[in-house]
Amino acid sequence: MTFGQLGGLPAVAKALGPRDGPWRWYFERELALYRAFEKSPPPVRLARLLDASEAEGVLVFERLRGAALCDTRMARAPLGEALREALLESIDRWGSIAVDDPRWAAPSPSADERAALRAQLLEDPSAPLAWITEGLAACPAKKLLDRVAVDRALAALEAHPQTRASHGDLLLRNVLGLDDGTVAWIDLECAGPHAEGWDLGLVWVNVDDADRAAVERRANALGASGYRAWAACALFACAREKLYRTRSRADDARGLRLERDIDFLSRITG
C-alpha cells in the first residue's frame, strides 16, 4: 500500500504484486466489483475507488479515517465488544446480498488460473463450494489434516450446501475500525458467494480466544447442520493457516493453537 493524495483527497494505492497465475484475475475481479458497487452500493462501508490503471495493475482508493483491526493474520489481542459486534453485524449485512446478484458477475478464472487457485488453496468465488471441498480433499496429501477429519468435514458440507454473499478473505487486517465506531471492508478480490459459514469460520480462527464465543454463537444460529458446516469451513481455514505458517516459519505457540482448534472442530463435524 502507498499513501498520498489524489485531487486533494487522502488516498491509498494498491498495486498488483505478481502478474502471473491467479493474481491478475483477482485484480480484474476486484476492479469489476468496485465499479459495480459504485452504481449500486453494498450494505457495508467500502473505501471509494478514486482511480485505476489496468495496464499498471494499480487501484487508488480514498483513505478512510481509521485503522485495520489487526496488522497480522492472527489477532494478538481481543477486539473489544464494540468492534467485535460491528464486525459481526457487517457480516450479517453483507450476507443480505443475494448470491445471484448481478454485481457478482465479474470475470471467471481461466482453466490455468483455476488450477493455480486450487494448488495454493486460494479463494474462488466463481466456485463457492467446490474450492473449499476440493481444498479439503487435498489436505491429507499436504499433511495438513488427516483423512478422518477431512471426510467428516466433507460430509458436513454435503449435508448443508448453502452459500452466502461473503467477503471471502475476512482477515482482521482487511477490516478497518473507523473513527466513528463503525467498520469498513477492504481488499474485495475474493468477495462473492461462498459456503455460508466461510466468513464466520475464518474470523473464528483468527480472532483472540476472548472473541470466539460471540462468533460461535452466530454459527450456532445457522442451525445444527449449518453449525457443522461452519466447523468444516473453520477446519479448512485452520489447514490453510498451517500451510502459511509452515512457509513463514511462524512461532510454535500459535501453531499449537491451530492443532487444538483442529481437534475441536473435527469433533463438531463428526
Image (spheres, grey):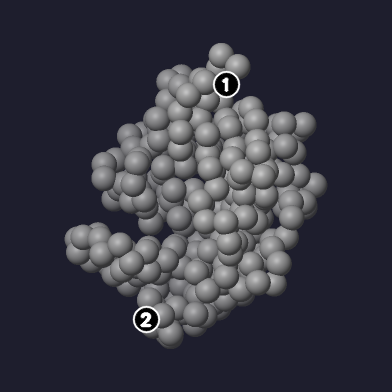
Earlier residue among tags 2 and 1: 1
Q: Position of residue 201 (x, y in %)?
A: 46, 57
For the view shown, which residue lies furthest in the top direction?
8
Q: Secondary structure at mark 2?
A: loop
The residue type indicated by label 2 comes to Lys
Q: Is residue 8 visible?
A: yes
Tell me: residue 267, above or below residue 192. Answer: below
* In this rendering, the label closer to the viewer, 2 or 1: 1
**Residue 46: which quarter of the image?**
top right
Q: Mark 2 to mark 1: distance in Å?
A: 47 Å
The residue type indicated by label 1 comes to Leu
Q: Which residue appears at 61% of the width and 73% of the height?
A: 115
Q: Which mark is residue 46?
A: none
Q: Position of residue 195 (x, y in %)?
A: 60, 61
Left or right of 4: which side holds 189?
Answer: right
Identify the residue position indicated by label 2 in the image.
Answer: 143
For the view shown, which residue lies furthest in the right direction?
102
Left or right of 178: which side holds 127?
Answer: right
User: Which residue is at the front of the view, 252 or 87?
Assistant: 252
Q: Which residue appears at 59% of the width and 40% of the height?
A: 58
Identify the residue position indicated by label 1 in the image.
Answer: 6
Quadrant where the C terminus is found in the figure: bottom left
Q: Is residue 92 visible?
A: no
Badge 2 local density, few (<14 within 10 Å), some, or many (20+)? few
Q: Position of residue 126 (x, y in %)?
A: 69, 61
Tell me: residue 154, above or below residue 170. Answer: below
Tell me: residue 158, above or below residue 127. Answer: below
Task: Check whether the beta carbons of the residues at disc 2 and disc 1 lie within 8 A of each other.
Answer: no
User: Which residue is at the front of the view, 217 or 133?
Assistant: 133
